[in-house]
Image (tube, grey):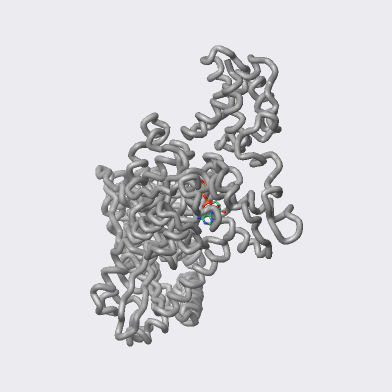
Amino acid sequence: MIKQSLTLITGSSQTKQVLHEQLQQLLDDYVHIESFATEEALPTQLNVDFILFSSEVTRVEAHELSNIHSNELFVGKRTVHHQFIDQLLKIPINSDVLVVNDDDSATVELIESLYQLGIDHLSFVPFKKEQIFYEHIDIAISPGEPHLCPPSIKRVIDIGVRLFDMATILKVVEYFCLGEKVSSLISERYIRNIIDLQRKLSIAEQNAKQLNQHIQNVVDTVDDGILAINQHQKVTVFNRGLEALFHFPVIDAINKPLDEVIVQQEIIDFILSSNEESKFFTIYGVDLVIFRHHMETENTIVATFKSINQAFEVEKMAQRELRNKGFYAKYDFDDIVGEHPSLNESKQIAKKLALSEHPILIQGETGTGKELFAHSIHLHSMRKNGPFIAINCSALTENLLESELFGYEEGTFTGAQKGGKKGLFELADNGTIFLDEIGDISLTVQSHLLRVLQEKELRRIGGRKVIPINVRVIAATNKNIQLKSQEGTFRSDLFYRLNVLTLSIPPLRARIADIPLLVKHFITKSGKWVKVGQDLPEQLQKQEWLGNVRELKSTIDYMLTICDGNKIEWKDIPQDRFQNNRPNEQDYPIPESLLEIDEYLFMLEAIKDCNDNGKPASRQFISMASKENGHFLSPQQVRRRLDILEIHGFITKGRGRTGTKITSTGAEYLQILKLHAH
Ligand SMILES: Nc1ncnc2c1ncn2[C@@H]1O[C@H](COP(=O)(O)OP(=O)(O)OP(=O)(O)O)[C@@H](O)[C@H]1O
């Protein structure tokens, strides 16, 4: 049998190749196929039986290039290759998709065939060359013309050269009178590929259904109500807990607009647009707390509904955890021993200050009981059930203090904990934070702290998320921070914020009448059954207590350890101090040369001045000061002298920024040296 002949004319050679292959695969047994592309060359004279054009544009072009005679001229209809359809189906619903083809009519035709194929979940935007405003569109599809896509497009799906559709193939079959048997064979070949795709799609659909059912089963096992809504405010997750609460069946709720499922407008408003993370509601008589979370990557809001009892349980668990970490107040006003009017007055004022929400600044010499007051204030405040966290600001380096207080995000610095770390401010939420030795914090930490106090929110170091916090700050200092703010080492705006409510704690020397009570208290607390020597309280009252109650406490602790039998007496007092009421020259080594006396006198005075003014008494500082004094001591010389002073117990060398401090013995020695100086 002589094969009849079909002539295919396309525009580009790529299209020629793909369509030729398609026709050959389907018709080769029955029809001879010859193909031309207008971009290559067309015979000037074309005398053939049946011409199939790839598009209307090609038909017009071909007639311009060649003298065509044919029994039948037919412009084929084209459709998207099935293998690309599942890629298109995976594009999220309602996405804007730019459709890019080389001419406008072909673009419209492509969009039509996409709709006909059932790809109707996207919004197609036809590409026009002269138009350049496609910034909002991320995805484009193009049949073999991806180079035409504007550069702003992030993802191009090249759906390749489109094939002839079934109707076109049937038209050819009909023209060549191939008979019913052949035509059904050809349609079967055509359809087989589509069935493959269909199978793939139905498996995918089944998997998706199974996954959905699995998610539903999981969320149904949770006691809380769980709700998720997409950017179109339609419900995507709704569990059994909510079914029971709202009397609304799960199957009816999925995919419904939120306001058709929940009728209470205040709940809808809270879920859709609140800035708060949680809020209390009563729904059909049930008291509950709704927690909301915006998942930005998925543009989804998730709301969990917890019954009030469960919410309390969670709160209690969090509190228990904080207690385990020691973040709770341990002392109350009753633990502050003393009856002196000055102390009583401080307690009365503190109780009043406790009831307000403003920051408090506690001022007082070292060891006077500022931390005890901070604990007690917390327990006397509305926040008593919240955490209480105390931190000594001078004990940490600047960077460590900042990350301890404000936390950090993952990867902020080498060694940073995975997942980032909550700072103490976050942990103290709904409670109180006690910042001891606030006068020592660096200007960087000061400005971070100021922001937290002003905005009532914080950003972790290296983080962008703003975290609202509700923490009351109690700060304490034994330095004159007003003076520091005048000198410029303490921000005055922070000072004024902290100094809204001030509390002064009297030094022990201003209430020596309390010493016997304190002695008794410390002995009782030690759990030892010892008597107190008759004249001991009176002797202790005569001493100078530069370290205040802390020094008294450590003296008593020492005496309790070394006393014989069941009585503590004056003889048990630490050897190097208090042996006499007045400083005794024989107890102290007096340097032989006047020059040396001057040097030690100068050094102890410099340290004492620094201590009194809250400046760190560093080696460098003392060395610089010696220059001004006219007797220059290098930092090494200063170090040697500091070592000697430390051996005699006249100073203590603190680590970190606290620096060197003069002891009470040192202060006495200073008095003696003054007598010997010229
Ligand atoms: N009135 C008091 N009654 C009982 N104990 C007291 C009293 N005052 C202070 N203490 C005890 O003295 C020690 C020091 O007190 P605290 O730490 O509160 O002082 P501080 O003023 O905060 O000291 P610093 O300025 O050095 O931080 C603690 O052991 C505390 O229990």
Q: Going by the picture, which residue comes out furthest to the left? A: 265
Residue 300, image x and y in percent?
A: 37, 65
Q: Residue furthest top?
A: 630
Q: Is residue 75 left or right of residue 368?
A: left
- From the viewer's perspective, is 359 left or right of 366? left
* Vertical arrangement, residue 389 with respect to residue 145, above or below: below
| Residue at 58 percent of width and 20 percent of height | 623
Question: Residue farthest to the right?
Answer: 564
**Residue 377 at what x, y percent from top left?**
42, 59
Residue at the image point whose x is 53% and y is 30% from the top: 608
Q: Which one is nearer the viewer's eye here, 388 or 524? A: 524
- Answer above or below: position of 626 versus 27: above
Which residue is nearer to you in this view: 339 or 497?
339
Residue 65 occupies quadrant: top left
**Quadrant of the rendering where the C terminus is positioned:** top right
Identify the image quadrant of residue 326.
bottom right
Foreground residue among 76 and 597: 597
Q: Position of residue 261 (x, y in %)?
A: 29, 79
Q: Is residue 29 visible?
A: yes
Instruction: Describe residue 120's horizontal placement relative to residue 576 as left or right.
Output: left
> Can see residue 426?
no
